[in-house]
């Protein structure tokens, strides 16, 4: 099995491999250039993201600074994905994000982990497990998603949550560890924040 195959199969491998580090550094150089763009350079940012990411749909917006282990090389975004500043993508393996999903500031999606055994960590061993975020999700400020997690369509993850287990579709979940609090239901068609009514004339 090649080192690239190990990266994407939850196998142990050394992230200190010289060729791998050289490849990763080239991706990080491109990410640096993206983060140095001006707010007025929207078209340039879009062009760069299409070159940097594995896939990125139309009308995505990522507010710099973006942090990413591989500069988005293993990231798959649908269309109309919005990410506020400080998004961290530990994309040592694949991250999949559905259409219309939103990330508040300082969300972390971490696919990489390290063995508990100290001797293996000394040798820079790690493993990676893919993350899948569904369509039309909203992850609040400071959410951390751990390796191998799936979050279902339409779900909302409350600010500051640490997602250690899969979250189903159509729920509100929060906490450390993150837990499902309730399903999204009829009351969400009527109110949007602390009992405030949704006025159809505002929509």
Image (spheres, rainbow, N blue to C red):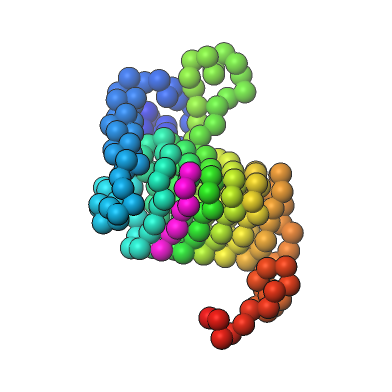
The quarter of the displayed image where residue 16 is located:
top left
Using the image, determine if residue 33 lies above or below residue 82: above
In this rendering, the count of numbered labels is 0
Q: Position of residue 5 (x, y in %)?
A: 38, 34
Asked if residue 96 can be seen in this view, the reply is yes
The part of the chain drawn in magenta is 80-86
Q: Main secondary structure of the magenta part?
A: loop
Membership of 81 in magenta stretch: yes
The quarter of the displayed image where residue 22 is located:
top left
Q: Please give left or right for residue 54 compared with residue 8 in the image.
A: left
Q: Position of residue 69 (x, y in %)?
A: 41, 35
Membership of 149 in magenta stretch: no
Image point (68%, 78%), residue name: 197
Using the image, determine if residue 38 lies above or below residue 78: above
Q: Position of residue 146 (x, y in %)?
A: 58, 41
Image point (62%, 60%), residue name: 156
């Amino acid at each position: 099995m090649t080192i690239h195959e190990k990266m994407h199969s939850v196998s142990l491998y050394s992230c200190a491999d010289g060729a791998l580090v050289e490849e990763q550094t080239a991706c990080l150089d491109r990410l640096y250039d993206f983060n140095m763009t001006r707010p007025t350079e929207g078209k340039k940012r879009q062009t760069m993201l299409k070159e940097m990411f594995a896939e990125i749909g139309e009308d995505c917006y990522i507010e710099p600074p973006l942090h990413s282990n591989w500069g988005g090389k293993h990231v798959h975004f649908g269309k109309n994905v919005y990410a506020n500043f400080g998004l961290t993508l530990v994309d040592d393996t694949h991250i999949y994000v559905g259409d219309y999903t939103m990330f508040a500031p300082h969300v972390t999606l971490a696919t990489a982990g390290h063995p508990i055994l100290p001797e293996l960590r000394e040798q820079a061993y790690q493993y990676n497990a893919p993350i899948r975020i569904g369509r039309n999700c909203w992850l609040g400020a400071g959410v951390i998603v751990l390796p191998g997690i799936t979050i279902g369509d339409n779900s909302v993850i409350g600010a500051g949550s640490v997602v250690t287990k899969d979250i189903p579709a159509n729920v509100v979940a929060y906490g450390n560890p993150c837990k499902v609090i309730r399903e999204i239901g009829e009351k969400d068609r009527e109110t949007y924040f602390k009992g405030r009514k949704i006025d159809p004339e505002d929509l």
